[in-house]
Amino acid sequence: MNSVKILSLIMSLASCMILSGCGLFPEEEEALAPPLKAPVAVTYTTTTAELGTIIDSVTTTGTFISTETYDLSFDKRSGYLSELYVQPGDAVEKGQLLAKLDTDSLELDIKKQKLSVERAQIALNAAKAAENATSDSIRLAEIDYEMQKLQLDELQDELQKQSIYAPADGVVSYIASTGVGQYVTARSTLIRVVDPYSIQIECTGDNVSNFHLDQEVIVTLDQTEYAGKVVMTSAESPVDVETTGSFIRVEVTDELPEGNWLGKSATIELIRQKKENVLVIPRNVVSMYSGESYVLVLEDGVKKERIIETGIKNSTEIEVLSGLEEGEEIIIK
């Protein structure tokens, strides 16, 4: 069989295979559809927009101090401390002797001078009663008596300068570490007496700049609230008040329970804004973008962004003026 016939036979067989749909290769199987898989349900943690009360306030703490304080010293004399009659916490009365320097020799001189005054008084009485008394003899006796009396007054005045007396009723709040027998310099504070009933709360720290004169505040003492008022700030303090930076003083306008409040601490709260029956949401669900506030709400199970208008803010909550309704669910981030 020649090559032409062989080629013709091969082409005939190929045509037959194509037309008959049969061939030497196996039939291609149909691709199977992927198995169906239910999508995972998305769940959110939400909170509900509710009506409530929102407060914007600022707080600070302070300590009770006395507004009537007396720093006492030996103003005119230095010397060795002879007696100290009080201790911190002691109640004292006006005019009570609190401390004195060593005055033994001075006290002896006063005793002697009192005798000299008494002798001069006797001599004056005798001069006046004498039968041959003259105006000059009587006058000389008067002069001697007055001189002796002046010397006694000078000695007693000197004794006063070497003693400390309570200037008013009060409580001893401080005594210097100087002990009996030690040298005390003039005009150095040895004792401080305060009036325990004339008290205010003094506050310092960064937050005091938010408080101003005559503002009404809430004072919390031992978990009980009292009304108070700002009665002094560092900007309006009198010239005789010692200042060490920014401070305010608050007076409790309600009646306090009896007791010694000096040195005790209190919390002062200033309410700057307060609204009741308004829509309030947690502050941490609000985000900012391009100067606008928005929240993520859940509508029919779908998460959506919602722009809102806000009002009062504090550290934990925000007032919503528009953009939300009571009862709507907000997604917590």
Image (cartoon, rainbow, N blue to C red):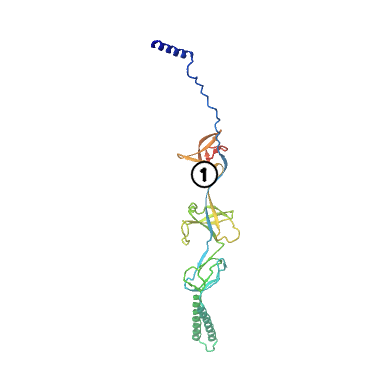
Name the kind of residue labelled 1 in the image. Ile
* Residue 149 sits above or below residue 198 on the image: below
Q: Quadrant of residue 170?
A: bottom right
The residue sitting at the right extreme is: 258
Residue 237 lies, with reference to residue 86, above or below; the image says above
Residue located at (48% from left, 40% from top): 288
From this viewpoint, which residue is outermost toward the front? Answer: 1
Where residue 239 sits: x, y (%)? Answer: 46, 61
Quadrant that contains the N terminus? top left
Q: Nearer the viewer, residue 133 or 192?
A: 192
Identify the residue at horizontal 49%, vertical 79% (top origin): 151
Number of numbered tags placed on the structure image = 1
- What kind of element bears circle 1? strand
Outermost left residue? 3
Q: Looking at this view, is 148 or 258 the one in front?
A: 258
x, y (%) of residue 215?
52, 52
Disc 1 marks which residue?
Answer: 312
Q: Say few, some or many: other residues with alpha carbon within 10 Å of mark 1 (under 14 / 14 to 19 / 20 or more).
A: some
* Frontmost residue, 144 versus 308: 308
Is 12 left or right of 267, judged from the image as shown? left
**Whole-percent x, y for residue 88 in the image:** 55, 66
Return the x and y of residue 188 as percentages of the image width and height.
47, 68
